[in-house]
Image (cartoon, coloured by chain):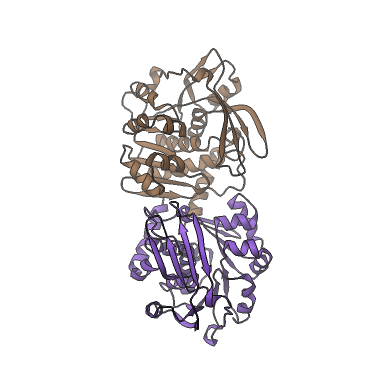
Chain colours: A purple, B brown
Amino acid sequence: MSLVIVGSVAFDTIETPRERREKIVGGSGTYCALAASFFTRPKIVGVVGRDFPKEAIELFKKRKIDIGGLKVKEGKTFHWEGRYGCDPNQRTTIRTELNVFEDFKPELPSGYWGADILFLANIDPDMHEPILKQVQKPKLVAMDTIRLWIETKPEALFRELQHVHLFFANDEEIKLLSRETNLIKGGRKLLECGPSIIIVKKGEHGALVFGKEFIFGLPAHPCEEVIDPTGAGDCFAGGFLGYLDKVKDFSGREIRRAAVFGSVLASFAIEDFGIDRLKSLTQGEVEARFRYFKRLVSF
Amino acid sequence: MSLVIVGSVAFDTIETPRERREKIVGGSGTYCALAASFFTRPKIVGVVGRDFPKEAIELFKKRKIDIGGLKVKEGKTFHWEGRYGCDPNQRTTIRTELNVFEDFKPELPSGYWGADILFLANIDPDMHEPILKQVQKPKLVAMDTIRLWIETKPEALFRELQHVHLFFANDEEIKLLSRETNLIKGGRKLLECGPSIIIVKKGEHGALVFGKEFIFGLPAHPCEEVIDPTGAGDCFAGGFLGYLDKVKDFSGREIRRAAVFGSVLASFAIEDFGIDRLKSLTQGEVEARFRYFKRLVSF
C-alpha cells in the first residue's frame, strides 16, 4: 500500500513556560510523515523555501520518507510562532508567516497518483478537491482541520467532510463543528456528515474513536512532563494512518489498534521540543509503549 | 466482610439548564450506600431531621442497607442547593443549610466496630480521628474530600491522608492539593503523602488509578446526555468499595475491576435526577455495563 500526506513543512518558534526555541523544524506534514515512517514509507507533499535546512531533508531520507512531492521554492519557509501556558492545552498563536506556503498548489508526482491512503493535514478545505482529483482510487481518505477553517470556512469544511472516510479532530474542534457541548453527541453527529470514522484527540485525556457500530476509548499515556505539545495531533494521525497502511486492513479491530499506535507516537512527540524525540525514537520503543497501553487499560 | 460509610444524608435542590428539582433525596452517604448495595450490604452512618421522607428509609431497607447508624434528630435535614451550567462539570453552590448536620458527631453502633472497610465520605477531616477510634481493625480505610476542606483545612487533610489507604479525588482536587498542573505528577505526589492508592475521577474523561507499582486508566462510559451529575463521584466510591467488600481481595487486579464498577455506577447515576436511576437499576444492567466497558477499551 502507500500513504500520501499533504501538509505543511515549516519552521516553528515555540515558547513554553520553561524555554523558547527559535525556528525549529515543524509543520503538520513533517510530524505526520515522521510518525508514519515507523510503520510504512510515507510520501509527503508540501513546499519549503531555500532556507529549509538540509539536515531535515536528510532526516526525511533516513526515515525512508518519499520527498518526491516536496517542492523547494525561492523564498522563505512557512513560519509559525506559538506560546504555551502552564497548561499545555492553552496555546496562543503569536505570528503566522505563510511565505512560500501562501500560494501552495499541491501537485502530486505521478508516483503518488495510485495512493491507497490520502491524508489532508490541516489544509484549506478549498484545496481538497484539486488534490483528490490527482489521486486515482484511494481506498481511504482522511482529513484533519484547525480552528481557523472551522471559523472562516465552515461550509467548505462540511462539504469536504462528505468526501472523506476518516476525520481527525480535537475535542474543542468537535464541539465547535457540531455545536454540541457533549462530546459523545458531537462525535456521533459528525458521523452523519460523511466520515465513517471520527477520531477525537483529547490530549492528556486520551482519545475516542467513533465508528458506525462501535466506540473505542483510550486514556492517554501518563506523561509527567509535557515538554512541547506541538505536533502531537499530527503524530497521532501519522501513527494511525502509517499503521493502517502497513496492515492493509481497515476493520474495527485494526482501527482500534491504529488509534493506540497514534497515541503511542503522540506520547513520544511531546517528550521533547519539536521533532527531537522522533529523531531518537526506535522501533523497539514504539512496540514497548504499545504493550504499556495494553497493561494501562487491562482489567 | 463489611463496609461502613460515614457521610451526609441530605436534601438537594438541583438546577440544570433543562430543569429544577426541589428538595430531592441526596447526600454523599446516600449515593455511596445505594451504589455499594449492588455488591454488598453497606452500613451507613449519618444524621437526618424529622422531615426526612419515610420512602427514602424504606428504599435503604429494600436495598439491604444497614441503617443502624443513621440517626434521626429533632430539626431539619441538611439541605444543599446547586446549579449546573451547560457544561455539567461547572457547578455553583447556591445555598448550604447544614441544619442537623451542623453538630454531627458520628457514633458507630457496636455492630459497626468490626468494619473491614471504612469510608469517610466528604466529611470534615477533623472528624476522621474520632471515627477511626471507633473501628477496631479496619483492613482498608478510604476517604474522599471536597474543595471546601482543601481550602479551609489543608493541614488537617494532609494529616488524615497519612491514615488512609485509598484516596478518591477529582482532577481539580488533585491539582489543588498537589499544587501541580500535571495530573500524573499530582497523582504520584499524593501517593507519597500516605495512601497506597489514589483514584482520580475525571468525569466525562474517565478515571485514573495510581498504585505504588501501576497506573490504570479508563475512559468514561460514553453518555450522550448527562441529566444530573450530582452524586456521580459518591457512586463511583460506592461501586468501588462495595465491589472490594464483596471480593475480599485488594490486589491490583481487583482494584482495577473495582474502578470499573465505580465507573459503571457513576455512569448510571448521571442518567437521571438525584437517586432516581439507582432506584430502577438492576443487577443485570450493572453487569452488562461492566461488559460494555470491556469492549470499549479492548484492542
- The residue drawn where x is 59% and y is 17% is B51
Q: How many marks?
A: 0
**In-front residue for pair B3/B221:** B221
| Vertical side of A122 occupied by B266: above or below | above
| Vertical side of A226 occupied by B91: above or below | above
**In-front residue for pair B203/B46:** B203
Image x and y of residue B78, in percent: 54, 22
Q: Is residue A284 visible?
A: yes
- The residue drawn where x is 63% and y is 79% is A130
**In-front residue for pair B119/B78:** B78
Q: Residue furthest bottom?
A: A110
Image x and y of residue B76, in percent: 57, 17
For this view, does A65 lie left or right of residue B285? Answer: left
Image x and y of residue A38, in percent: 40, 72
Q: Quadrant of residue A56?
A: bottom left
Q: Is residue B247 visible?
A: no
Image x and y of residue A174, in percent: 59, 57
**In-front residue for pair A232/B135:** A232
| Vertical side of A20 occupied by A8: above or below | below
